[in-house]
Image (cartoon, rainbow, N blue to C red):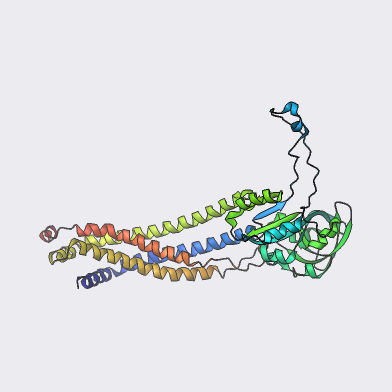
Amino acid sequence: MKNKHIFEIAWALLMSRSKQTLVAAIGVTFSVAFFISLLGFMEGINKLLDGFFLNRTPHIRLFNDVKPSANQPIDMDSTYSGYHNFLSSIKPAQARKEIYNVESIIKKLNSDNRVYGVASKVTAQAFYNLGNIELNGIINGIDVIQEAKLFNFSDYVFEGNFVDLNNKQNSIILGQGVADKILAKKNDLIQITTINGEQFSLKVIGFFQSGNAEIDKVQSYVSLGTCQKLLGKPSSYINDIQIKLNDMSLAPAIAKEYEQLFKIDAEDMQTTNAQFETGSSARTIISYAVGIVLLIVAGFGIYNILNMMIYEKMDTIAILKATGFSNADVKKIFVTISLSIGLGGALAGALVGLFFSGIIDLIPFNSRAAPRIDTYPVDYGIQYYSIAVSFAVITTYFAGWFPARKASSVDPVEIIRGK
């Protein structure tokens, strides 16, 4: 019965200062709304930027690196055993670039439950020729279907059909930067000159944008067979194996394992691109910090309003305590007021935040780095709503608890005597 009266009194006190209550609730509403829309927008941008990198980067890359021989003649001479030998001008070892026994390696990788997929690749240096224009570049021979599955290749081909690389012989998809420099258009025939001096005619069937202008200025894509033909190599020639894992975090350990197992160089994504994770984490921390500050500011607004209410309602508090309400009951009244403002404002803020996110999602976003993105990206993850509402309720609880403790310590005798 007493709890019913506590809620009735809390409601009456809320309504007695309806304007201030509304201002406090609006403060919480907009703090939650900005938190949700800001986090959703920033995480959407993060995922877009991360996607440019993650979609095009293998978790593990197997290849034969060009490096000096580990065993130099002086190291094999027993005369100098135990010495520290300092060598200069060491030449790279005479080793082939292709991966040995590639079919067995790929079969072994595909049987590993930790591996999501494997894509073979051949890289060739060449010159693009169109009329008098000549441009140095890199041609990537890819397994078209696996490249689309593992690296979302189709998302970056903004003109033409990527599958045509398999269906049409001697075809090429140019990076947009390459196409702009040599003035190439779709269905043009361009001349390719390899570093061995061989010339080939390839038909342009589409254009590619990776999100990195420097890459798009030099790179283009052909099928594996076409690239092997450019190099004059057999169909077994592969110089790069790209691996996607089911769990990206395992890449460093698995890369070391494969390096020892296959006696080949292995490069994991985390080791070679440590700055990527640092930048992504920093953007996320900044977003959360700004959002939490907004909620704390709203909490201070509720604290100030309840403090003023206590000073104005001293006589009411004294009468409540004189008629049998305990210190705990008075504390419950003011905590109830605070939580009512916080919870009501938080729920309204979640709806307003969803509305703001929808507006951001409709704003046009045109970038040559992301040809298939038409509007600003927004992440509608439920976690942002639950975090915002939970933190708002916790903040407003503490904003009400301190004034409530002050109200519960009021001496009714002193107040009534003063009146």
Q: Is residue 218 visible?
A: no
**Residue at far front of view:** 78
In the figure, is residue 161 to the left or right of 322?
Answer: right
Q: Is residue 350 visible?
A: yes
| Quarter of the rendering occupied by the N terminus | bottom left
- Tally the marks: 0
Camera-nearest residue between 192 and 129: 192
Residue 328 position in % (x across, y down) = 21, 62
Residue 406 position in % (x across, y down) = 23, 57
**Residue at far left of view:** 417
Residue 377 position in % (x across, y down) = 57, 65
Residue drawn at the location 39% of the way across and 61% of the way down: 391
- Quadrant in the rendering for residue 173: bottom right
Camera-nearest residue between 93 and 295: 93
Residue drawn at the location 21% of the way across and 59% of the way down: 407
Q: Is residue 68 above or below residue 414?
A: above
